[in-house]
Amino acid sequence: MSTTTIAITSIGLFLLAALAEIGGGYLVWLWIRQKKRLIFGIVGGIILFTYGIIPTLQPSNFGRVYAAYGGFFYYFFNIMGNDGRQKETR
């Protein structure tokens, strides 16, 4: 596998993992906090389970890749997940 292919695959898997974590977590949140139907929680749980598998598909060193996920998710959240509203408090 060429270096370019590995880089493209890794970036694609980072994006997929970010979407799975945010999307699955959001569906579970909707189910619990917004009293949506049970199907939201089930689908969210399946997506979060899939999110746990995605790092194992990385073609690079797992330890380094897993550490990079944290930084990537932080960056992705600040682009996609931060809508400028004040954080929710109880």
Image (tube, grey):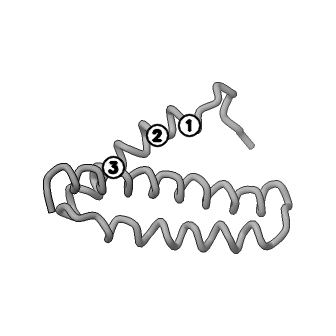
Cβ atoms under marks 2 and 1 closer than 8 Å? yes
Cβ atoms under marks 3 and 1 closer than 8 Å? no
Q: Residue at x 80, y 72 (%)?
A: 38
User: Can you give x and y, in whole percent of width and height, for residue 77 in the image?
Assistant: 51, 39
| Amino acid type, mark 2 | Phe
Q: Which residue is mark 3?
A: 11
Work out whether residue 2 or residue 14 is closer to the camera in this orientation and state it. 2
Q: CA distance from mark 2 to mark 1?
A: 6 Å
Q: Which residue is mark 2?
A: 76
Work out whether residue 69 or residue 59 is closer to the camera in this orientation and state it. 59
Label 1: how many residues lie within 10 Å, few (<14), some (14-19) or many (20+)?
few
- Secondary structure at numbered mark 2: helix
- The mark lying in front, picked from 2 and 3, is 3
Label 2: how many residues lie within 10 Å, few (<14), some (14-19) or many (20+)?
some
| Amino acid type, mark 3 | Ile
Question: Could you tell which of marks 2 and 3 lies nearer the N-terminus?
Answer: 3
User: Can you give x and y, in whole percent of width and height, for residue 59 in the image?
Assistant: 22, 64
Q: Residue at x 47, y 52 (%)?
A: 18
In this image, 18 relative to 40: left or right? left
Q: Which residue is mark 1?
A: 80
* 53 over 2 or under it: above or below: below
User: Can you give x and y, in whole percent of width and height, for residue 53 in the image?
Assistant: 41, 72
> Which quarter of the rendered picture does the N terminus lie within?
bottom left
Question: Could you tell which of marks 3 and 1 lies nearer the N-terminus?
Answer: 3
Q: Residue at x 83, y 55 (%)?
A: 34
